Image (cartoon, rainbow, N blue to C red):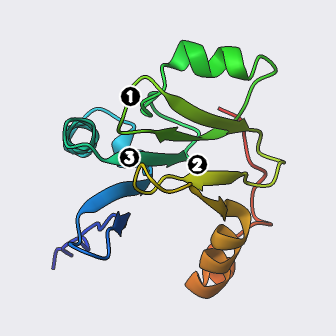
Amino acid sequence: MERTPDPITEAYLEVLTTEDEQLVTAVEVLSPSNKVPGAGRREYLKKRKECRTGGVHLVEIDLVRGGRHTTAVPEGRLRRLAPGGFDYHACVTLEADERQYFVAPFPLAARLPTIGVPLTLDREPVAVELQPVFDRCYDEGGFARLVKYGHRAPTRR
């Protein structure tokens, strides 16, 4: 009997206003499907465009080493910001100006950065320490049981 694959769900976070529940900021952790040609990438790029045209701030966290450059910041600009290289990055695009970015590139061995998550234009961004957030997700998600760290040495792509 052929087994049907489990559906793939991609989680995201939305920051809404308390008054009228308007979307203010979308937070996306990129997945491999966002970075390779196909339906997943097309849908992601469509969502990013909807954020830009809809006046929504966008926070993109790219922890996927493979695939095409996907975040809103141009790849050349990102590389100029980190001339020594980087493995991952976070990109915050403000709704007021799609060319205005906050970018935090970082290498594999570094702690994840603290980023400012933008709210409404009359409020200061909220500082979010990504490392504790991801540590908690890792611990509570049972990933230590799923990942077999001692079985094979990682390779650089």
Whether residue 75 appears in this view of the structure is yes
User: Residue at left 67%, top 38%?
Assistant: 104
Which picture quadrant has residue 132? bottom right
User: Residue 154, percent across and down?
Assistant: 74, 48
Q: Which quadrant holds the C terminus?
A: top right
- The amino acid at mark 1 is Asp
Residue 57, numbered circle: 3
Q: CA distance from mark 3 to mark 2?
A: 20 Å
Whether residue 12 appears in this view of the structure is no
Q: CA distance from mark 1 to mark 2?
A: 25 Å
Nearer to us in this view, 8 or 70: 70
* Contact between labelled residues 1 and 3, with CB atoms less than 8 Å apart: no
Residue 63, numbered circle: 2
User: Residue 26, percent across and down?
Assistant: 36, 55
Q: Choose the circle earlier in sequence order: 3 or 2.
A: 3
Residue 97, numbered circle: 1
